[in-house]
Image (cartoon, grey):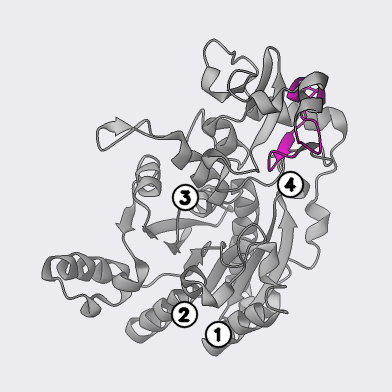
Amino acid sequence: MVEYKVGSLFAGVGGICLGFKNAKTKNSKYKLLWANEIDEYACETYRNNFSHQLLEGDIKLVLHPEKIDDKKEQKYYQDLHEKILKEPIDILNGGFPCQAFSIAGDRRGFDDDRGNLFLNIIDLIKQLEEKFYKPRVLFLENVKNLQAHDNKKTYKHIKQKLNGCGYKVFEEVLNTMDYTDVPQNRERIYIIGLSNEKDINNFQIFKNIEKKQKKKDKKSRIMDIKKVIDYSLTNENASKYYYTKEKYPNYFMSDEEFEKSNKKEKINLTTQIDEMYEFYQCRRGMYVRKNQSGVCPTLTANMGTGGHNVPLIKVNDGIRKLTPKETFKLQGFPVDSRYKLPTVINGKVYPDSQLYKQAGNAVSVPVIQMLATEILELLDNSENTE
């Protein structure tokens, strides 16, 4: 069994890592060497689920500890720098921060520090090439809008940078709901960079990818939804997730209350959220909308912080938002079996808001596993090609 070594940047809670970990063929699999993440809450979730080394810290400082003045901090980052360059890797992956390019953010792109984090990928490739050799495969994920951002200049710049490092770049936008059993409408761009000529010549992954689409009717979608939504929860044992008139009076307005208000549109969740196995949103507190695709709308990082993209559902005893566990399941994480959400951090209760943020920032694990398996088959094929 051939093992291809993997390093992961911007690892978050490990969605890409889990997809690669689960992928295998009869001849090969991946070995996760290390992952890097800066957010302490995400790191806690990551450590809860993976045993390989996690390099916690700012990737810019990991790659350049010499720029740090504080001796203690410099020593910490010098140690991480040595670990990230301890041995070569075959695959470098990363879901580099998307907020700078997302239509849900302010779309400042490379004018945003988060957008510039992409350049650390280029930096690490060069450092690995100087010491060993550059990774054979790059696997990157981002929001669909990356391609169109700034009149397509941003993505053109990204491809030029990767081309300059010797990579042929392939990309495709895939929707989670089309290629997996996970009921979420989530379009993301998946970027694969190849440096090996045989791999490039044999690359067919995106050519006929639509053949892998899953056709779902209403009945099968409901079955998928039942697997991720816990309909056994009640207002008695999960009251903090419920929307009630006491907590949200403006969301349960009577005709009389609406007439007396200055609202342009009446909101009454009891009457407007009226179907089980459907997902709704109260958009900016102004109107209620059912997601027309029959699945959950795209999960966002602001779900747990009062943002307007909180998916709402009808359950047996009322209306509630999704629980953190359900949002992770809507990204394909096997929460009830092989993936555990933390309950404590630094001796304190782990906040739901951080879990919502992590789920919104995460990737859809089954999509990653599908593509990671295809990459393994590509590598196997290249090894067998004379």
Q: Are marks 2 and 1 in contact (CB under 8 Å)?
A: yes
Between the residue at mark 3 and the residue at mark 2, the CA separation in whole angstroms equals 21 Å
Which mark is first along the chain, 1 or 4? 1
The image shows residue 251, relative to residue 203, as above or below, that is above
Q: Earlier in the sequence, mark 4 or mark 2?
A: 2
Q: Residues within 10 Å of mark 2 (few under 14, many from 20)?
A: some
Query: Which is more toward the observer, 162 or 153?
Result: 153
Query: In this orientation, which residue lies closer to the viewer: 161 or 251?
Result: 251
Q: Amino acid at mark 2?
A: Ile
The quarter of the image holding the C terminus is bottom right
* Whole-percent x, y for residue 293 in the image: 82, 42
Question: What amino acid is labelled 3 in the image?
Answer: Gly
Residue on which the image places disc 4: 185
Quarter occupied by residue 375: bottom right
Q: Main secondary structure of the magenta part?
A: loop
Q: Position of residue 178 (x, y in %)?
A: 78, 48
Could you say which disc has been placed on residue 161 in the image?
A: 1
User: Which residue occupies the foreground of this view, 220 or 142?
Assistant: 142
Find the magenta span and give its range. 262-286
Where is residue 327 shown, x and y percent of the image?
Answer: 58, 37
Label 2 element class: helix
Residue 309 in view here: yes
Give the farthest residue toward the front: 260
Alpha carbon separation for disc pair 1 and 3: 26 Å
Residue 254 visible in the shown view: no
Kindly check if marks 4 and 1 are in contact, taking CB atoms under 8 A apart as contact. no
Residue toward you, 322 or 15: 322
- How would you rate the neighbour count of disc 1 (Cα within 10 Å): few for under 14, some for 14-19, many for 20 or more? some
Name the residue that disc number 3 marks: 14
Q: Is residue 97 above or below residue 366?
A: below
